[in-house]
Image (spheres, helix red, strand yellow):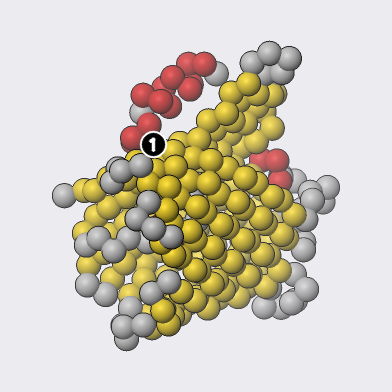
Amino acid sequence: MKHLIFIVLILFPFICFSQVNMESQRSDKKGFSGNNTLGIDLFKGNVEVLTYNLGLRIDHKKGIHYTFLQALHEYGEENGIEFQDVGFGHLRWTAMWFNRIGSELFTQFQYDDFKLLRLRQLNGLGVRIVPHKILAIGVGAMSDYEKLEDNNTDLIPRSTNYINISKSINDKAKLSLVTYYQPSLVDMTDYRILVESNLEFSMNKRFSLINAFIYAYDTRPPENVLKDDMKINVSFKINWGLK
């Protein structure tokens, strides 16, 4: 495991994944831009605990078109026993055809070993509305394919909706809050809620620290999996641009 961490740190700029919510990271820069994030906790003594999250975000903006790719990997072990292994990837294209109103297409995959989730594949489309520079609203529909640890599979049509508020407190701090609501289109008692809040402190143009609070709720989790999760995370972020 020590060798793995060493390799991760050496390759950090190339393989990192991102912890931060997707909406708050949209950039105003034209062309390519992006960031890497890294968060590590290591405890030695009565217990030995290692956790890390690695992140990558790539954005491209040209005219009315905005495309981004975001990916995440989180891992944790205690006394050599793994207790967390999560992977996530999201690709989205947005086109603001009417200034404040546009369309979105996206695809997403994720897995979570300790929620018995081998694969969740989402494909969807929707409408994006930006009534104010600090507020964005999304309304859409998607297919939700799941494969669980026992090889059971399910395919459910869902509505997918979000509200994002992002506000700079001053030239060094930015606060963002996004809430996702995803009910089944065939059974409204089956829904998911995700709330992500981030407070980002910039040290300079390249480096910043991010404090994140994440709450997830699922009315129909796999058997023996809790309905809700809460997480507080601190990550180090490097911003960069591509020419």
Q: Which residue occupies 69% across, 50% down?
A: 230
Looking at the image, residue 208 lies above or below residue 81: below
Query: Nearest the camera: 202 or 238?
Result: 202
Picture coordinates of residue 233, whole percent (x, y): 57, 42
Q: Quadrant of residue 141?
A: bottom right
Q: Is residue 128 left or right of residue 233?
A: left
Q: Amino acid at mark 1?
A: Ile
Q: Which residue occupies 48% across, 21% down?
A: 4
Q: Is residue 159 left or right of residue 208?
A: right
Q: Which residue occupies 52% across, 16% down?
A: 2
Label 1, on which residue? Answer: 15
The N terminus: image quadrant? top right
Looking at the image, residue 110 lies above or below residue 104: above
Query: Nearest the camera: 177 or 56?
Result: 177
Q: Which residue occupies 56% across, 38% down?
A: 74
The reply to whether residue 73 is in sight is no
Give the secondary structure at mark 1: helix
